Amino acid sequence: MWSALKRLYHQLGSPKWFYEITTRWSPWFLWIGTALMLVGVVWGLAFAPADYLQGNSFRIIYIHVPAALLSQSAYIMMAVAGLVGLVWKMKMSFVVGKTIAPIGASLAVIALVTGAIWGKPTWGTWWVWDARLTSMLILLFLYMGVMAIYNAIESEEMANKAAAVLALVGSINIPIIKYSVEWWNTLHQPATITLTKKPTMAPEMFIPLVLTIIGFYCWFVVWVFARTRNEILWRERRTKWVKSLLSMGANR
Amino acid sequence: MFFDSFTEFMHMGGHGIFVWLSYGITCLIIAQNFIAPVLKRKKVIKDIERQMRREQK
């Protein structure tokens, strides 16, 4: 058991191993994610019944909730990657943390923009400075802060450390986002999905939401893999395996 | 199908503009997430190959 864990740790830390394993895994995540998204979005847009209060504007939920959920999960992953990098000096961990930042930022943008558009017909306003919306905006700024650190700091080692520390300090924002709808008065409705309670939505509304959530997660994996593979290629450019990979001319 | 006609589907009881705008913007951002690493990969491979050629000379 212990030796298996130890082997896994060393494999995870090996760029070559990561590159090879993601060559095989990426297509699976891509096509399963795409299938789930297609079914979920078509179902949610055309077949699910309209909400009795919000009418058809509620159909935005099928992209808003997955993006919001994933932008927070991605942040936790980025912070954990930073922690692992700091504690065990694992290079690959920093690389993954670095690649998550722009993806997480794009997901936070989706959540904020679709939320604003949804707010207009539902609340009568695009934006309010309440706890949920403000803490989500801070999440976006935290992602942008990590990206800015990598752009601004020349030394890779310094950039890795600074970005990891920012990611860790900023993770205090995650529980604030989660509980903002309970701690403060807010226009935002409470959580649609909880792991502990039965869904309050009808199944024909709820199932497509589950599909788009899993679909978004699959696509997220594809994006992280793709960006991390680019980083690996460049870092390992002087190694034998990258040179022979490129000389074969495969994998364009 | 929840809607009776395609026009109704597009209109969504007056909410069409909000729903389609949301999905449109999301589509663009998702497309960017797929395309950006592919372009970057091409650039990285090109840069490495250029470097390899220089070192061979």
Image (cartoon, grey):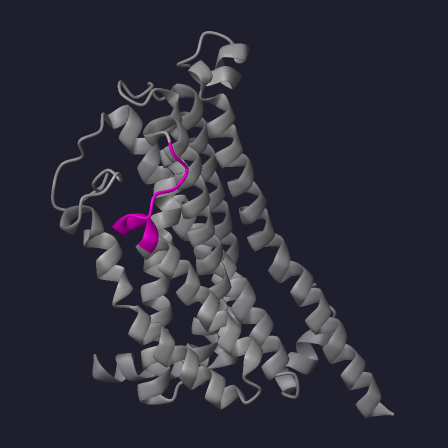
Q: Quadrant of the C terminus of chain B?
A: bottom right
Q: Residue drawn at (80%, 80%), measured in percent from left and top? A: B50
The x, y position of residue A109, in whole percent, is 46, 51
Residue found at the very far top of the displayed protein: B4
Q: Quadrant of residue A36?
A: top left
Q: Residue drawn at (29%, 84%), measured in percent from left and top? A: A6
The x, y position of residue A80, in whole percent, is 31, 73
The x, y position of residue A48, in whole percent, is 35, 22
Above or below — where is A138 with respect to A219?
below
Residue found at the very far left of the displayed protein: A197
Above or below — where is A79 with respect to A222?
below
Q: Quadrant of residue A118?
A: top left
The x, y position of residue A37, in whole percent, is 45, 39
Q: Residue drawn at (57%, 75%), measured in percent from left and top? A: A231
Asked if residue A156 shows in the view, the reply is yes
Q: Which residues are magenta?
A: A125-134
Q: Is A107 within the magenta?
A: no
Of residues A232 and B33, the one drawn nearer to the viewer in this rendering: B33
